[in-house]
Image (cartoon, rainbow, N blue to C red):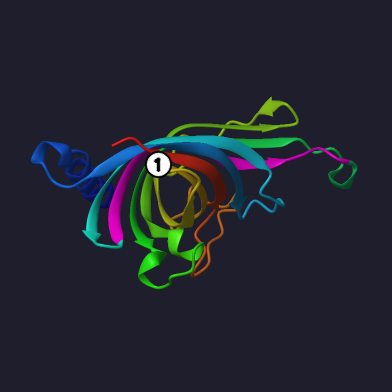
Amino acid sequence: MRHISGFFSIVLICLFASPLSGQNFGGGFKGGMVASEVSGDHLAGPNKLGFYASAFSFLPVGPYAHLQGEVMYIQKGSRSVPNKHNDYYDYRFALQYVEMPILYVQNMARFTNNNYLSRLLLHGGLSVSILTRHKETEDGYVLLSEPNTYKPAELNLLLGFSFPIRDALYFQVGYSNSITPIRPHASGETAWNNYGQYNTLWTLGLSYIVW
């Protein structure tokens, strides 16, 4: 994971340093809401709400596509909302990350002349998330975990789309799922394709191109 984090850092440095090289670049800021759950905790979701905020820079890789790098703060985790169906079980699992996404963004104008579809931007890519803080509570009591329980970083798959609202303002919908586990199952069990618990989340937000 250290080698992957280093690779992402190098790519992001190149993207954010592009203004110094005089290349044709752009960039801005984005933020919004997060609805998340943790796969493997046996809770329905996504019930955990949070937010994200990031700065991004992009470089064209063709007339209808660009490569985008970001530095993001994002909240993830899961929650059990107390109700009569779960015996009023109150559980909160809060995770905070600094995330480094690298996205390939495709303008659909390359494939269609439809007035709406041609304005749509599809994006997909990977990100590395560095865990900065975590807290787990059950019925108001803080649960203590072993220091090595949580993975210090995770690799994620990212998918989503953007649609312009105004000239430089875009509405965004995103989906993210961990490729690597965030921590082992409570039982310690593993399977050939399941090594623990994984973050799954949806995002709704706005992005604004500043330059």
Residue at the image position 40 percent from the left and 36 percent from the top: 54
Q: Residues within 10 Å of mark 1 (few under 14, many from 20)?
A: few
How many numbered badges does the structure rendering display? 1
Snapshot quadrant of residue 81: top right
Q: Amino acid at mark 1?
A: Ala
Give left or right: position of 152 versus 163. Answer: left
Give left or right: position of 30 versus 69. Answer: right
Tell me if residue 192 comes above or below residue 172 in the rendering: below
Q: From the image, which quarter does the C terminus lie in? A: top left
Residue at the image position 55 percent from the left and 54 percent from the top: 188
Give left or right: position of 78 versus 192. Answer: right
Q: Position of residue 28 (x, y in %)?
A: 34, 37
Q: Main secondary structure of the magenta part?
A: strand
Tell me if residue 5 comes above or below residue 117 in the rendering: above
Give left or right: position of 20 versus 84. Answer: left
Q: Is residue 103 visible?
A: yes
List the residue tagged with mark 1. 168
Q: Which residue reaches farthest right?
A: 84
Name the foreground residue: 113 vs 139.
113
Residue at the image position 58 percent from the left and 31 percent from the top: 144
> Within the magenta stretch, is there residue 72?
yes
Snapshot quadrant of residue 168: top left
Snapshot quadrant of residue 80: top right
SS for dot 1: loop
Q: Position of residue 64 (x, y in %)?
A: 30, 62
Q: Position of residue 180 (x, y in %)?
A: 43, 56
Q: Which residue reaches farthest left?
A: 21
> Within the magenta stretch, is there residue 76?
yes
Q: Position of residue 63 (x, y in %)?
A: 25, 62
Name the foreground residue: 199 vs 138.
199
| Magenta-highlighted residues | 65-83
Name the foreground residue: 13 vs 209.
209
